[in-house]
Amino acid sequence: MENTIGPLLTKITEQIMSEIDAIKKELTKLKVRNQVLVSLLLILIIALISSAFVQPTGSKVPEVIRVQGIIIEDNKGNERILIGAPIPFAENRIRTDTSRIKLTWGKRMGGNYMKWYKNYNHDANGIVILDENGWDKIVIGDPVPDPIIGNRIGPETGMVYNDSQGLERSGYGLLDVEGELRTVLGLDHGNGTEGAALSVMPDGSVGLYLNSDGNSIFLGRATPSHWTSPDSSDFNGMIFQDNNDNYRIFKTKKAP
């Protein structure tokens, strides 16, 4: 029996380490993007203050700038950065252009997608960076908009990264689910499903979740109510699930 368990644990350990290395690389990319974004915002603020509110010599410089929204365009006249509470409407933003959504995501998803889309939240109190085509690429807000493929289970405060068609691929935020707060860092697959997530749940569950092609691993502490756990009691350990819903659980023994 020991000869069987040994190679299995070695294989499991190698798989986990490989997944963790991939997550580290993604986190490094997110860190670099955040640094670039912060630098851009600082430049933006300095530019706004120096160009829009330059006063003649001897006049008093305003101490507070009060605006409801700001739209920044690129050199082609495309709206690229939206700032506001809520963000202002932009002609170039695809999220709020039903006809363009129908030709893109409506065609891609089919069925009742356009009916569901009417109930999505597209607003944000914060900053939205658009690409040259008008897709949301980076959002910082309280809350951030719904994903383009469905409603969030609650309002989320944080940062979201989208791909070239507005699909959410990564995000870090504080999610309010009926008054209970969840802290989550997520990395998503290209079909919108969750690939990796670090989470801290209000019930005390804390862990790393990895999912690929229907096979998943959870590493951490989970309570009986945790969505990844088939166990009837609290545990610290690992849960393996294959695409046929077969589970294998490795957990630490409780202290006597």
Image (spheres, grey):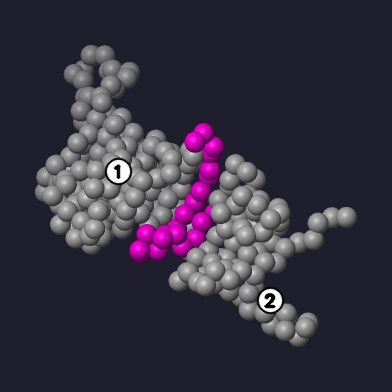
* Three-letter amino acid code at the position of disc 1: Tyr
Q: Is residue 72 above or below residue 5?
A: above
Determine whether, in the image, residue 194 is placed left or right of residue 138: right
Q: Nearer the viewer, residue 206 or 90?
A: 206
Q: Is residue 179 magenta?
A: yes
Decide which of 242, 202 is in the foreground and name it: 242
Task: Report the residue marked by disc 2.
Answer: 9
Q: Residue at x 47, y 54 (%)?
A: 186
Q: Residue at x 22, y 60 (%)?
A: 110
In this rendering, does residue 201 appear at all?
yes
Residue 85 x %, y %: 31, 30
Residue at 19%, 60% (x, y): give it. Answer: 107
Tell me the number on the disc at residue 120: 1
Instruction: Report if the CB atoms under discs 1 and 2 are less than 8 Å apart.
Output: no
Q: CA distance from mark 1 to mark 2?
A: 44 Å
- Res 59 quadrant in image: top left
Residue at the bottom extreme? 3
**Residues packed near mark 2 inside 10 Å, few (<14), some (14 to 19) or many (20 plus):** few
| Magenta stretch: includes residue 220 | no
Residue 129 in percent (x, y) is at 28, 46
Q: From which residue to which does the magenta span run?
A: 178-198
Q: Is residue 75 visible?
A: no
Q: Residue at x 42, y 38 (%)?
A: 155
Would residue 27 appear left or right of 147 to someone viewing this image? Answer: right
